[in-house]
């Protein structure tokens, strides 16, 4: 999978978190932690960057996440 094929989660991460993948509970918890940290540490920074430098992408992102375009 290339970076262009995902927004936040890879297909594999989705399989693991949903329980479809045959992995240990510890590995699933680890993946959940990685995703939580990605959201906490990086998503806000990326949204702020888009707001400042790429208005169109910022609006698309906030509409997709917030459904009403308000953060």
Image (cartoon, helix red, strand yellow):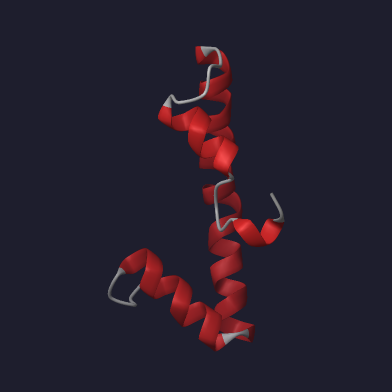
Q: Is residue 4 above or below residue 18?
A: below
Q: Position of residue 47 (x, y in %)?
A: 54, 69
Residue 43: image location, x then y, percent: 55, 58
- Nearest to the observer: residue 10 or residue 32: 10
| Observer-nearest of 17 and 41 | 17
Establish if 44 lies above or below 33: below
Q: Is residue 34 above or below residue 67?
A: above
Residue located 66% across and 62% down the image:
4
Residue 70 as seen in the image, left or right of residue 25:
left
In the displayed orientation, state which residue is furthest to the right.
Answer: 2
- List x then y, in percent, for residue 45: 60, 64
Outermost residue, left side: 68
Which residue is found at the position 56% from the left and 72% from the top?
A: 48
Residue drawn at point x = 33 percent, y = 76 percent: 70
- Nearest the eye: 2 or 64: 2
At x 29%, y 70%, the residue is: 67
Image-quadrant location for residue 68? bottom left
Residue 59 screen position, x and y as percent: 45, 81
Left or right placement of residue 60 versus residue 12 in this view: left
Quadrant of the frame with the C terminus:
bottom left
Total tally of numbered discs in the picture:
0
Q: Where is 71 relative to 36, above or below?
A: below
């Amino acid at each position: 999978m290339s970076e262009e094929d995902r927004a936040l989660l890879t297909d594999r991460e989705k399989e693991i978190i949903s329980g479809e993948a045959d992995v240990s509970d510890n590995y699933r918890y680890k993946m959940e932690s990685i995703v939580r940290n990605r959201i906490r540490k990086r998503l806000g920074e990326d949204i702020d960057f888009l707001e400042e430098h790429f208005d169109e992408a910022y609006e698309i992102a906030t509409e997709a996440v917030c459904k009403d375009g308000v953060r």
